Amino acid sequence: MKKMMSMAIGILLTVSFVGAFDRVYDLSLDEFEDLQISEGGITLNNFSLAEDSSFMSENYAEVQVSFSIRNRNADTRIVTAMIVGRTANSIIWAVDASPLLSRVSANKTEVCTGSSYVSPGTVKPTTRIWLRVVGNF
């Protein structure tokens, strides 16, 4: 057990100190959809935003955000994004989007999606996107 714990701590320290990317973006809808982030062998692009009817509930819609993550590194990297939709005066929706277990395998491209239930029509008044991307790249 002690040996396993030491190995787990070693892996976490290795993953944690590869690099620290933590940036915030305040974007118009057009800027959000055209955004490309490239750093440390990681590229995020093809951002999209949509509102669609909910599969699970007739009374709600889903705000859906998706984007691509390309990892050109020889090892797995961690990437996560927090996305908030705003009007001039308020926050109207929020989504967390990450690949499975927040990991992108070496030399792979992942489609990253996030969704949340909202009242129908919630996404349409969105004028700005607040985006925070965090990862070890």
Image (tube, rainbow, N blue to C red):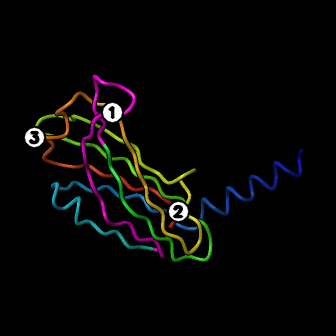
Label 2 CA crowd tier, 10 Å (few <14, some 14–19, many 20+): many
**Magenta part of the chain:** 40-63
Q: Position of residue 19 (x, y in %)?
A: 53, 67
Q: What kind of residue is marked 2?
A: Asn
- The label on residue 136 is 2
For mark 3, what is the residue? 88
Label 1 CA crowd tier, 10 Å (few <14, some 14–19, many 20+): some
Is residue 90 toward the left or the right of residue 62 in the image? left
The residue located at (61%, 77%) in the rendering is 74
The residue located at (41%, 73%) in the rendering is 39
- The label on residue 54 is 1
Front residue of 110/57: it is: 57
Q: What kind of residue is marked 3?
A: Ala
**What secondary structure predominates along the stretch shown in magenta?**
strand
Q: What kind of residue is marked 1?
A: Ser
Front: mark 3 or 1:
1
The residue located at (23%, 42%) in the rendering is 85
